[in-house]
Image: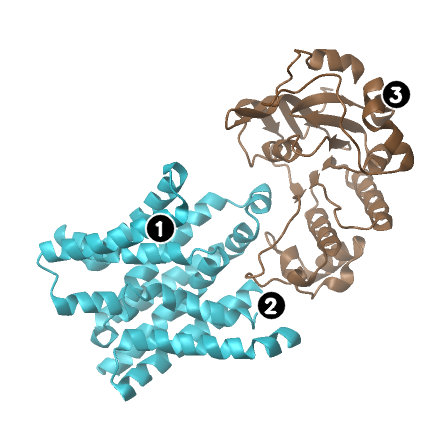
Chain colours: A cyan, B brown
Amino acid sequence: MLDDFFVRALLAAAGVACVASPVGCILLWRRMAYFGDTMAHSALLGIALGVLIGLGPSYGVFIVAVAVAILLVVLERFAPVASDTLLGILSHSTLALGVVTLALSGNGHRHDLLGYLFGDVLAVTARELVVIWGGGAACLVVLAMVWRSLVAAILHADLARAEGVPVLRLQIVYVVLMAAIVAAGMKVVGVLLVVALAIIPAAAARAFSRTPEQMALLAAGVGVAAGVLGLFGSLWLDTPSGPSIVVAAAILFLASFAAWPAARSSR
Amino acid sequence: MPAELPLVEARGVGVRRGGRWLLRDVDIKVARREVVTLIGPNGAGKTTLVRVLLGLLGADTGEVRREEGVTVGYVPQRVQFDPTLPLTVARLMTLTSRRPIDAVTEALDETGVGHLLGARVSDLSSGELQRVLLARALMRLPNLLVLDEPLQGVDYTGETELYDLIAAIVDRRGCGVLMVSHDLHIVMAATDRVVCLNHHVCCTGAPAEVVGHDEFRRLFGPRTAAGAAVYRHVHDHVHDLAGDVADGDDRGTHAGAG
C-alpha cells in the first residue's frame, strides 16, 4: 500500500495535521500566528545551512527555527522597535537570506525552491513517512504530558506560576514543538503555508468547542479532513497539492463560520 | 518552643521601574491563622507587593522568604480570560490540578455558584467569575490565601457572606490570608492586621489600634462611619513626583502614628 505515492501523501498530510492543528490552537490562544510564520520563514535558511554543514535539510530547519524563536524573544526585550515590526523584519529577511544562501550553495534550482515554498507531498518517501509518524507520535506524547500546565500558563501566567506551573519551561517546549512542525510540515504544504495548516483548523474548531481539549481534538480532525479533501481535490483538478490542502482548510473554516450562530446557541 | 516562622515575609523590599520606586523599604509578613489586609490608594504598589510576595516579580532590594512547600491559593486582580480559549467553569476549576467532580461541586457550592458548574466562563458576570475564582483558590486547600481585590463586582450582601466564609476557612484550616481591599467596612470586620501602603508602609497595626490613631482617622474616619468604600488618601507627609517621601519624614515617625 505504501508503494502508492498518493497513499503516502495522504498519510503524510494526515500525520502532520494531527500534530500541527493542536499546536495551532496554542498559537491561536497566545495570538502568536505571526510568530509561527516567522519561524517557518526561516526554514529556507535552515535548509541551506543544514546542507552546507552536512546535517541534512530537516535538522537544519529545526535548529534554525528554534534559533530564530530564541532570537525573537531576546530582541523583543532589547530592540527599540515594536514586536510586530521585529517579526516583519525577521520573517522576511530570514526568508530572503534563505533564498540567497540556497542559490550560493548551488541548491537553489527553481524546482527545488517551489517545493520548499509550497510543499511537495506527492514526492514523500516511505522513509520520510516513518519519520513524520514517529516524530509526530513523540510530539503528541510530549504535548499530552505538558498540556494541562500549558493551558493554565496560557490562560493566566501569574495564576499558573503562583500555583507552581513552570511557565518559562513550557514556553521552550512549545517553541520546540513548533519547530518540529515547521520541519515536517515543510514537506507537505511548504514553508509559506505551514502555519496555515496549524491555525486554520484550530480556528474552525473554536465555535464547536467548550473546553481546550475538545478544541484541540476537533482541530486535529479538521486538519486531517483538510489534508484528505485537499489531496483528492488536487488529484481531481490537477492543482498543486500543498496549496490545495490549505484551500480545503479555508473552505472548512468558512463552513464552520456559517454554522457558528447555531453552534453558539446550542453549546 | 521557637517562635513560629511566618508563611511569607518581606524585609526591606524595593522595586524600581523606569527610575521610580514602586515599592521602597517595605516590611510585611503573614503568619498562620492571620488575616493581613493591604490598603492604599490606586497605584500605591499593592498589586506589585502581592506579586513580589508570590515570587512572580523579583525585588530590586531586600529579601522575600516563603515557607518551603507552602500551597498558595491566589485570586488575582481583575481577571479577564481571553474568549479564544474555550473554557467551562468545571475545566477552570481543574486548571492546574485534577480534582474529583464532587470536590469541585462542593467548592463551588461553598461560594454559592454550584449551579454554574457547566457554564461557559465567557458567559459569567464579573461577580460570578470572582466567586468561581475564590472557590478555585479554596479548593486547593491552601496554607496561604492571597486575594487581590477578590470581590470586585460581587454585591454587598454577597460580599459580607463571602468574607464570613473566608473567616470560617481561616478558623477551620488555620491558613494565612493576605488580602488587598478597598472596602474599609470589611477591613475593620475581618482583619487581624492592616497595612496601609503608598509605595512605602504608611502605617500598620490591628484595626482597633489603627482606628484610634489620628492619621487613620484623617484617612478613613468620616467615610467609615457611612460604610462607604471610597476614601481619600491624606498624608502627614508629601510624596515627590518619583513617589519618594520628599520631606524626609520616614516610617520611623509613622511607627508612632500607626
Q: Position of residue A106 (x, y in %)?
A: 8, 58
Residue A25 locus on image (x, y percent): 47, 62
Element under label 2?
loop
- Extreme residue toward the front, this view: B241
Name the front one of labels 3 and 1.
Answer: 1
Please check whether the numbered discs 2 and 3 fall on a single chain. Answer: no
Q: Residue at x 33, y 52 (%)?
A: A88
In this picture, is B22 found above or below B100? above
Q: Residue at x 82, y 40 (%)?
A: B167
- Depth check: B31 or B36 in front? B36
Residue, disc 2? A210
Task: Look at 85% across and 18% down and name the residue there.
Answer: B214
Quarter of the image containing the N terminus of chain A? Answer: bottom left
State which quadrant residue B241 falls in. Answer: top right
Which image quarter: residue B108? bottom right
State whether residue A177 appears in this view: no
Taking the image as shown, residue A207 lies to the left or right of residue A232, namely right
Q: Gap between marks 2 and 1, in whole Å? A: 32 Å
Q: Amino acid at mark 3?
A: Gly
Residue at the disc numbered 1: A87
Please give the label number shown on residue B212. Answer: 3
Q: Which mark is residue A78?
A: none
Q: Nearer the viewer, mark 2 or mark 1?
A: 1
Residue B36 in picture, x, y percent from top left: 75, 31
Separation of disc 2 and disc 3 at Cα? 53 Å
